[in-house]
Image (cartoon, helix red, strand yellow):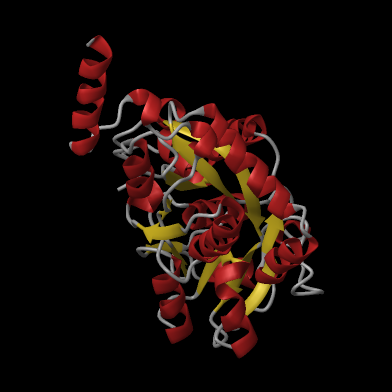
Amino acid sequence: MARQVVASFLALLLLAGIAPASAQSSPTSWPTRPVKLINGYPAGGGADILARLVAERLTQALGQQVIVENRTGATGMIAAQSVAAAAPDGYTVLHYTMNMGSTSPVMPGMKIAIDPDKELMPVVMIAGLDNLLYVNPQTPFKTVKDVIDGAKAAPGKLTYGSSGVGGSYHLWGALFTSLAGIDMLHVPFRGGPPAIAEIIAGRVDMMFGNLAEILPHIRSGGVRAVAFTSVPPSPVLPGLPTVVETLPGYQADNWFGLGLPAHAPPEIADRLNSEVNRMLKTPEFREKLVSLGFQPLGGSSDDMKNAIQRDRAKWKKVIDANGIRGE
């Protein structure tokens, strides 16, 4: 009789769409339905390009569709907050950026609704970015020295764009002006592509940005590449110098990775880490990344946590020295 009562109760739960814990999908069976990869930056930018490349290959590796969903705003923190608030079941994954873990948490005035250290789980670093300084081709600037000399001749007149106040492009420009002892006007936009459009149109002089999103415009002549801010320089533009050759101490790097809501099952985090490291060992995928302006990384979740803390310390000094405040 007792067995019949239990069986009847289980049947009612199933009819109501409520599965008992033992019948629910376990982490070892993940994923059994599509996975969302939340990207905090606009379509066409470096973050979006990489997110879609990774989503395509994770779809093949996991046997379930991985769908990129763009949730822009607050230099990526809108996306980070949405993932932190999601169910920790592995079906909402964050396209984690250096900004989310390293700069926004120490940015004065930046109102963020989460503590990334407590509410997000770093999983794996995917790739670094080849970053560079580029200018509108109608400007006379062809070298880093040209830019510095031009800024000294007209303090506060030269303009550099960025993807938003307190974002990585802004910080790269601030580090440049600090080390060079010059004054340039920062012009923020909502993402890299809008800023690039203004540089091509000649309404903004230059930007410190990433190669992935600007490469087509370099090749078309829409902008002129001046120097890499990252080290080592990319083989995609052979012969292009680095900023540090002219401005000692200057290096501006960035990276992307994957993250999950805190308390997600470790088995799911391990699976994602393994799949990303596996794809990064594939020559075809590595060559694709390099050709688009990325530096393959990979590694453990601890490697990513260490990078977050390292870059937080570095960029906090730049933020404090330049009096930068978020919006």
Q: Which part of the image, by quadrant, shows the N terminus? A: top left
Residue 312 can be seen, yes or no: no
Q: How far from the left and from the top, in percent, is residue 294?
A: 67, 61
Q: Is residue 114 left or right of residue 323?
A: left
Q: How far from the left and from the top, in percent, is residue 136?
A: 53, 81
Rendered view: 186 above or below 197:
above
Q: How far from the left and from the top, in percent, is residue 290?
A: 72, 65
| Picture residue at 55% right of the left edge, 86% below the top | 222
Residue 120 can be seen, yes or no: yes
| Picture residue at 70% right of the left edge, 54% below the top | 279
Report the front residue among 252 and 153: 252
Q: Is residue 271 left or right of residue 88?
A: right
Report the front residue among 207 and 5: 5
Q: How far from the left and from the top, in percent, is residue 95?
A: 48, 50
| Picture residue at 65% right of the left edge, 53% below the top | 128
Rendered view: 43 above or below 308:
below
